[in-house]
Image (cartoon, rainbow, N blue to C red):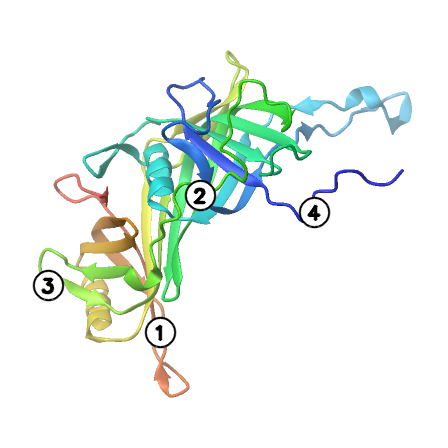
Amino acid sequence: MAPTNVRAGRVSALLAGLQSARGTVVDDFTATDAGRVWSDAYLDDVGPLKSDPAGWMTSSKMATVGRYTRPRPINGEITAKATPTLLEWLLRSCWGTFAGGQFTYSPYVSEWLTLAWAESVVDGAAGKFHRVYDAWIDSLTLRAGAFEPLSIEATWAAEREVAPLNITDLAGVTLPADPMTPDDKNVFPGRLVRLFRDPLGDNEEISLHSVEVSIDCNVIQEWDMMRGVFLVAKGGFPGPRVNLSFEAHVSDETWEVLQAAIDDTKTIYRLTAHAQAPFKQLAIDFHEMDFEVEPLGHEGQNCRRFRAVGQAQEDSSGNLTVINLS
């Protein structure tokens, strides 16, 4: 018999939606705070885990009754364009509440996500549709280069899932109209991503080549016997880990970064990015930044690019990282 419905030469889609409450799966992906993500890649942990089959004392072979399905944590990854809408959704999940253009860190998960994968964006095409819910973005990485827009990579952990459904038979589920075009296609060009040292004082701009911001909120996944799921929660101590790394052209400002590292002098760094249609600004302040610097030197006749990686730390006023999107 020939293969049927081979999934080649078609476009699939990632949809996301912020839930009204824990345990409430999103059914309408045309509602506010829901829709298609401008994703480049998505990993959806659909398959079960199986035990190592047990043998028997009376037989040298493995018996079929010795193999069973094991409970598994539900995890996955997202790679996407960092549009303002997606940044807001994922930071509300990962970091905390959002009001007045500013995110406020929360020590617990304040908003849960439903993530859905549709095998086809074409109405009526054969395929499957799979949702996970009570999901939380546990780590998030932003990257930008001189000629590359700001991108986002995120890992997620979820407590529950809905069994895969036929995409042609989604009773009670509303999808965006064919071909499910993302509503937000506004990107942050790499040429408009800037980094400043001591923005409240010297306000020195660093001549960037590329930059990366990583946030790790320390996921906890433990089997909850009472509810029969893998619990998903934010870990406590040491709290969120926020790193800033960059490549830059060697300049007086990069020597200042190195000198501060030698002197063990910590200060604020500010990363800004601008989307243009409509205008949106992302601004992240990293407090008490302390950098490690890679070896300097030259490659050919030019100075080797300056490379540094640092970590934000809490200052005496309780500030760690301040994130604004307005």
As helix, strand or loop, the secondary structure at mark 2 comes to strand
- Between tags 4 and 2, which lies in front? 4
Where the N terminus falls, by quadrant?
top right
Sequence-first disc among 4 and 1: 4
Residue in front for this viewpoint, 262 or 29: 29
Q: Is residue 216 visible?
A: no
Report the residue marked by disc 1.
305
Badge 2: few (under 14), some or many (20 or more) residues near its Cα, within 10 Å? many
User: Is the residue under label 3 in contact with that under label 1 (CB below 8 Å)?
Assistant: no
Task: In the rendered view, tell whether residue 137 sits above or below residue 194.
Answer: above
Three-letter code for the amino acid on which mark 4 is drawn: Ala
As helix, strand or loop, the secondary structure at mark 1 comes to loop
Report the residue marked by disc 3.
202
Q: CA distance from mark 4 to mark 3?
A: 55 Å
**Left or right of 30: which side holds 199?**
left
Q: CA distance from mark 1 to mark 3?
A: 23 Å
Q: Quadrant location of residue 276?
A: bottom left
Disc assigned to residue 8: 4
Three-letter code for the amino acid on which mark 1 is drawn: Arg
